[in-house]
Amino acid sequence: MSHLQVPTVSLSAYAYLLSELIQYAVDRANNVQELEDRLDGVGYEVGARLIERISYGERALRRKPEILDILKWIHSTAWPWIFGKPADSLEHAAAAEDEFMLSDFDLLLSRFISVPKAYGGFTAGSLAAGMVRGMLACAGFPARVSAHVIEHRERPKTTLLIKFDPVVMIRQAQLERK
Amino acid sequence: MVSIYTLYVVNKSGGLIYSRDFTSVAKVDLNDALRLASIWHSMHAISSQLSPVPGCTGVELLEADTFTLHCFQTLTGTKFLLVVEPNTPYVPALLQRIYEVYSDYVLKNPFYEVEQVIKCELFDEHLELAVRRHNV
């Protein structure tokens, strides 16, 4: 892991807490979309606080005005802090300039969860999507983030699709012109 | 080589919440399995009271000519029954492993309700893996 001092907690304690959180959300949501929105909302709050906490522990603190800087930071600094390992890949969508994909083959959030057919399309990754959205928003990169499970050869991977707001893209263009 | 026949999981009130055949030879009809599970549950409870051994927790092993039945009871009263070929080694270790898989992929699953029938893909998957590894 990096130079960051990462405090760790018991995986079981975390898994049971997460399970309760999801059950709480399931009891209060009418459909899958609402359920994911609830988790996303919780994740946003967590992300907004986490970005401060993680940056505080960094040695060289500096602002990250460029899209790639903040995404790489999430991929290789925030991810290990939250999930104990860096994300598996960070890609730029071929089709759209403002879309990026952050993927993980064994997302800690979904490791113990089997989604029943009645909840088709649900993924606990929405919580991570909310966290990433919160971190991006607080760093000055408003974006829409959604979580998807994608069948990939033998094992499925969880992909967070990040779509930045037009303002971010305009600023990025200005930065590049300089 | 077939040494593990069937796994049953019985909840603390004697209901069958999971059954899985690992071979095609010794198949039991679902209704019979339900009946067997509750018979075993009652017999287990009676045996622990009848037993001359102080602090007895019930039958752990049943040896028959054609199969051996291992029973593992958790602290909460959930029972794991494993029907295996006679003289299969390391069955208690496998039961421990199954208990571990159960607590990981069933109890940590927010969509599972305690004491209800187990329908978890990840549990099926990892159970299969544990049994296959044991057979090797």
Image (cartoon, helix red, strand yellow):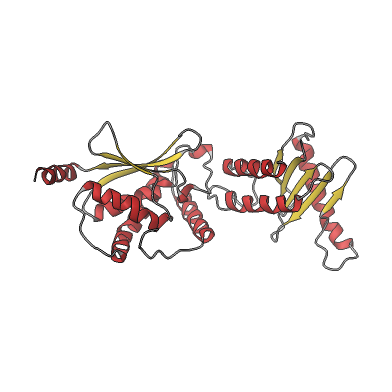
> Which of the pair B14/A70 is nearer the observer?
A70
Residue B67, position as x, y percentages in the image: 84, 42
On screen, residue B14 versus residue A121, left or right, reads right
On screen, residue A41 versus residue B63, left or right, reads left
> Which of the pair A29/A139 is nearer the observer?
A139
Q: Residue furthest left?
A: A178
Residue B5, position as x, y percentages in the image: 76, 39
- Work out whether B115 lies above or below B128: below
> Which of the pair A47/B1 is nearer the observer?
B1
Which residue: 43% across, 56% down? A84
Residue B129, position as x, y percentages in the image: 63, 42
On screen, residue A137 versus residue A117, left or right, reads left
**Picture quarter with the N terminus of chain B:** top right
Residue B134, position as x, y percentages in the image: 70, 45
Q: Would residue A59 be seen by someone viewing this image from the given angle?
A: yes
Q: Would residue B11 be seen by someone viewing this image from the given angle?
A: no
Which residue: 25% across, 52% down? A137
Which residue: 16% across, 44% down? A172
**Picture quarter with the C terminus of chain B:** top right
